[in-house]
Amino acid sequence: MVDFKEIRGEFPILNQEIHGHPLVYLDSAATSQKPNAVIDAEANFYRTINAGVHRGAHELAAARSTMAFEEARAKVAKLVGANAAEGEEEIVVTGGATAGLNLLATAFGNASLGRGGEAAKRFALKPGDEIVVSRAEHHSVLLPFQELAYRTGATFKWIDLTEDGRVRTDNLDEVITERTKVVAVTHVGNTTGAITNIAPIIKRAHEVGSIFILDACQSVPHLKVDFHALDVDFAAWSAHKMYGPTGVGFLYGKRELLEALPPANFGGSMVELAYMDHEAQYMAPPARFEAGTQPVAQVVAAGVAAEWMMNIGLENIEAHEKTIAAELLKLGDIDGIRILGPRENVDRIGTVAFDVAGVHPHDVGQFIDAQGIAIRVGHHCAQPVHRHFGLYASNRASSGVYNSVEDAQALVEAAKGIRKFFGVE
């Protein structure tokens, strides 16, 4: 039996008051808090084995720091069901999910220019080809692939949403066609909390020979994920949302696709041979995509975060947060409050965005913050989703492993007083 109250005690930041109230942190979809194990791992790296990885022959660089870096990669790979054996690695270190998605868009653009040779032609785009996303996408998916369409002349299309904000799967044959070359879809909506039914989307994408890319930012921290079982081609996510450090993320790719993909960033440690008078020869993945000095301490700490999550058990985390979600969904029972996303606690995580009639989201956020409760205010980098609901912004509560039913109840109780406070009842 997992003691989540005890787990909460591993997060030192939560032991404080905000505006005279005990802190209730319900903003994990933006960034999660860090347990002591992760904080200590990053600090201890600097204290004991800090050195440049994959370079240098001295003990710190050649053995200790490099080993810690690659062991962390293996832990992250295990978390998401990917390969980590030498020569078969499927995890690329990036600066975050946004960096990973931009890496893909840039690499596809390079392939479209003829870079990468024959193997890279599968990623090339031209006028008449199609790129498909969904209306539920975070801007970090929407914008890189929208820009890729502009650069290559490809047509940009999207899968629309159901009334309650789920990604539709009833018209995939119409949206994903024989001309579709790239499909990029979120696993879990960062505004609606809805878990996308990705199986039919992946199946349709592969039927037409398309590359399928998954935004896993909101699924890896909350659900048991196996990229091999899902049969995704690429996936990106950030460490800071899975109880790890900021400034680092990961890109998963099927090994054969990583081997065919041309590089997107250039510099040290990603080139086998460099010349003045002809083309360089680049290293095999993942090194090919890891130009320059990596955020080594952060990667090591992210590996600890992955191991920490696996020790708790992703099934246990999912079940715990489902209980929190049930309480947060009671926001929709309050007069004048509308939930943006599914009202039922099925195929969703504990992320609940809501609109308060007659009160600006920023005013709502300040009212809630005054009671020591941290939630998100704004469009959550997902403006098309908000337009789907006829809004420009909302408030969002999002849970993590450290939250309790009492945290959710505190928000619901606070929310009951919003409209009265602002005189709009």
Image (spheres, helix red, strand yellow):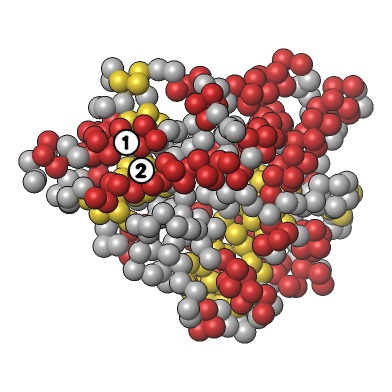
Badge 2 or badge 1: first in the primary sequence: 2
Amino acid type at circle 2 is Glu
Front residue of 402/250: it is 402
User: What residue lies at 54% left-to-right and 45% top-to-bottom?
Assistant: 318
State how many labels appear. Answer: 2
Is residue 246 left or right of 284 when viewed as pictured?
left
Can you say whether 408 is above or below 61 in the image?
below
Please provide percent x and percent y for residue 105. Answer: 61, 60
Front residue of 238/34: it is 34
Is residue 185 left or right of 378 when viewed as pictured?
right
Residue 410: which quarter of the image? top left
Question: What is the spatial separation of the Cα atoms under label 2 and label 1, in whole angstroms?
Answer: 6 Å
Residues at discs 2 and 1 in contact (Cβ within 8 Å): yes
Please provide percent x and percent y for residue 354. Answer: 29, 50
Can you say whether 173 is above or below 280 in the image?
below
> What is the secondary structure assignment of the residue under circle 1?
helix
> What is the secondary structure assignment of the residue under circle 2?
helix
Please provide percent x and percent y for residue 57. Answer: 92, 27
Amino acid type at circle 1 is Gln
Q: Residues within 10 Å of mark 2 (few under 14, many from 20)?
A: many
Q: Residues within 10 Å of mark 1 (few under 14, many from 20)?
A: some
The numbered mark at residue 409 is 1
Can you say whether 208 is above or below 22 in the image?
below
User: What residue lies at 59% left-to-right and 33% top-to-bottom?
Assistant: 1
- Looking at the image, can residue 62 be seen? yes
Residue of label 2:
327
User: What residue lies at 12% left-to-right and 36% top-to-bottom?
Assistant: 421
Can you say whether 7 is above or below 111 in the image?
above
- Looking at the image, can residue 30 be seen? no
Most extreme residue toward the top is 47
